[in-house]
Every structure is written in C-alpha cells, then in structure tokens.
Image (tube, rainbow, N blue to C red):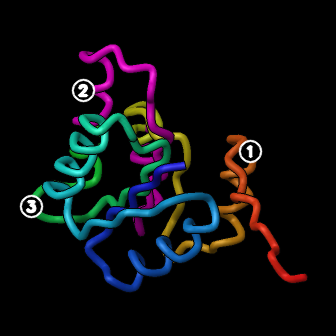
Amino acid sequence: MNILVVDDSKLYRDTFSKNLSEYGTVDSSENGVDALRLFHLAHAKNIPYELISLDVNMEPISGLEVLKSIREWEKISNTRNVAKIVVQSSQDDIKNIMKIYDMGCQIFLRKPVKIDLLEEKLNKLNIVKTPTINLDF
C-alpha cells in the first residue's frame, strides 16, 4: 500500500509515518502544496496513494483544501484509485466534523491522536498491516 502523511508538525509526521509504515510504503510532506504535488506525481507514475493522512491546520493551504482538491481531481479524472483519507484536527465541533466527512474523509481523529484508535479505525476499513516475513532459521 502506498501512503502519504501530511502534517506541518514534524512530531506528528514522524509518529504517523512510523506507525503507518506497518501498512505499506510511506511518503511524507509538511504542507498541502507539496502533498498535492506528490499526489499527482504518484498518479502519473501509476502508483497512487491508497491512504492519505491529513492535518487540518496547515499553511499555505489547509488539509481541507487538500482533501477537496484530491476529491475533485479523482472525480474529474474518473480514477478507480480513490484514496482513503484520514483527517486529524484539534477541533472537535460536530458540525465541522460532519463537514469533513461530507467532503470525502473516511476517518476523523481528534488530536492528540491515539495510535490504537487509528489502528482500530483502519481495521474497520479493511486496511491491515503488511505481514512481515521472518527469515530467522
């Protein structure tokens, strides 16, 4: 699985990247502009991201703007490779959370994120860890 982690916090980026590396190959970005560049590059290389983790509060464009751009591009391009998107935010207003789901997010997590909750939600989407091969003899 090809995964993209987008967060302007190095701590969150590193934590998510480390934990999600158990599910596949992880790229990371510290802002939405670079995230969209990586998203389009992955599609151009025919290795699209299957899972994208987005922070809401980023500059110069927010995670919600990235989410909107991704969903619009997927719709216009008629791609069959629609990414599952996890959004994290310190905001927990139910109206904003519902808006985020309406925009096409599959998982919303409130910061600080509990990794076991992330794993539980990924399992519900049938996203499972990559099996490791033990080469010990």
Q: Which mark, by number, is residue 73?
A: 2
Give 130 or 33, whichever is nearer the viewer.
130
Q: At label 3, which amino acid type do we have? A: Pro
Q: CA distance from mark 3 to mark 2?
A: 20 Å
Indicate the amino acid at tag 1.
Lys
70 magenta-colored? yes
Q: Circle 2: is it few (<14), some (14-19), or many (20+) Cα within 10 Å? A: some
The crowding category of the residue bearing disc 3, from other C-alpha atoms within 10 Å (few below 14, some 14 to 19, many at least 20), is: few
Chain part drawn in magenta: 69-98
Q: At x 56% / y 68%, what residue is drawn?
A: 21
N-terminal-most mark, 3 or 2: 3
In the figure, is residue 76 to the left or right of 51? Answer: left
Residue 17: x and y, percent?
A: 47, 72
Q: Please state which of the two labelled residues, at mark 3 or mark 2, is closer to the viewer.
A: 2
The x, y position of residue 129, in whole percent, is: 71, 59
Secondary structure of residue under mark 2:
helix
Question: Disc number at residue 124?
Answer: 1
Q: Which mark is residue 60?
A: 3
Could you tell whether 36 is left or right of 25 in the image? left
Q: CA distance from mark 2 to mark 1?
A: 26 Å
Query: Circles 3 and 1: CB distance less than 8 Å?
Result: no
Q: Give left or right: position of 112 versus 36.
A: right
Secondary element under disc 1, as helix, strand or loop, is helix
